[in-house]
Amino acid sequence: MLIRNRLDELPALGVPLHLALGMFDGVHVGHQTVIARAVAAATSSGGLAGVMTFDPHPARLLAPEQATSAVLTTLPQKAKIVEALGIGLFVALRFDAALAGLAAGDFIRQLLESPIRTLAVGDDWRFGRGRGGDVEFLRLQAAATGFQLETVPPVMVDGERVSSTRIRQAIRDGSLTAAARMLGRNYAISGPVVEGRRLGRQLGFPTANVAVDEQLTPPDGVWAVRVTLADGEARPAVANLGVRPTVDGTTRILEVHLFDFSGDLYGCEIEVGFVQFLRAEERFASIDLLREQIVADAATARLWLT
């Protein structure tokens, strides 16, 4: 998949472009429907299917007091997910003051300096300075310049519109099954494995500590998870999310024990997919009791993952 970061890099690609536009935080089933329109257009008429998104989220610049500090998908996660959907071009525009001040018409004029054949958007998408651009504006531009506009109505799950806001609430509530229905996959956190206190190794359960600073996390506790390694291999695991009160922990971390694994993961990027909540985090009276509970948790996680 090609990766670009500026509008002026696109003309040099030299092929017709079919782009899905949006933030796509979570790349949920609604987003996937928009992306599918771009892929279908490229398949039917030739050219390159692409996703154009913005980083960081515009709200962080335009309304920082209202913006969520946690994302559902990091930029690398987003790229990986859309590539699997058939996307061959990933454009992540830096959302800064210059881009925020660009009027909708100027943004489209710059975009159309490239051979745009299709633009696909959700029917409520707004863009440009003061959110001045909308679907009706795009229809007028399409009629004037000849590109095909694909608009996608809301996608419904469980009788309600799918949205990143709704998914965030489900994750905060611990409703990971509901979140998975809206995402079309299990919710997953991605991050590098960092050095820890190596307490898990002393207990007979070595763990990988995952840095998850910018991503939304579900409720603290013990989870059955699937871990995807850097080479794409998926392995069953049990994870603890929290402060580890039995060993006087003070920092909230995600630590993962991969079953039947002995490799070195320090510095590697891994993805932790949450499958099933097992129990809340708790303080045990002794390390031996904690060890016994970890054995039981691992056995339960294996049952959920087989």
Image (spheres, helix red, strand yellow):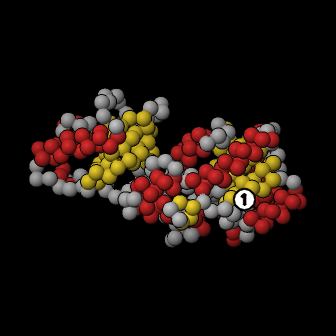
Q: Where is residue 23 in the image (x, y as percent from the top left)?
A: 61, 56
- Whether 211 is drawn above or below 229: the answer is below
Q: Position of residue 14 (x, y in %)?
A: 81, 38
* Residue sitting at x 39%, y 59%: 175
Query: 56 or 220, which lies in front?
Result: 220
Side of 234 relative to 45 (left or right):
left
* Residue sitting at x 65%, y 40%: 86
Side of 4 relative to 210 (left or right):
right
Residue named by callout 1: 151
- Residue 162 appears in which quarter of the rendering? bottom right
Dot 1 falls on a residue whose secondary structure is: strand
- Give the quadrant of the C terminus: top left
Q: Is residue 55 visible?
A: no
Query: 32 or 11, which lies in front?
Result: 32
- Whether 67 is drawn above or below 14: the answer is below
Q: Where is residue 51 in the image (x, y as percent from the top left)?
A: 67, 48
Q: Is residue 16 visible?
A: yes
Residue furthest toward the right? Answer: 144
- Whether 139 is drawn above or below 267: the answer is below
Q: Specify few, some or many for label 1: CA neighbours under 10 Å numbering under 14, 14-19, or 20 or more.
A: many
* Residue sitting at x 60%, y 56%: 30
Q: Position of residue 145 (x, y in %)?
A: 87, 56
Q: Which amino acid does label 1 sit on?
A: Thr
* Residue sitting at x 69%, y 69%: 131
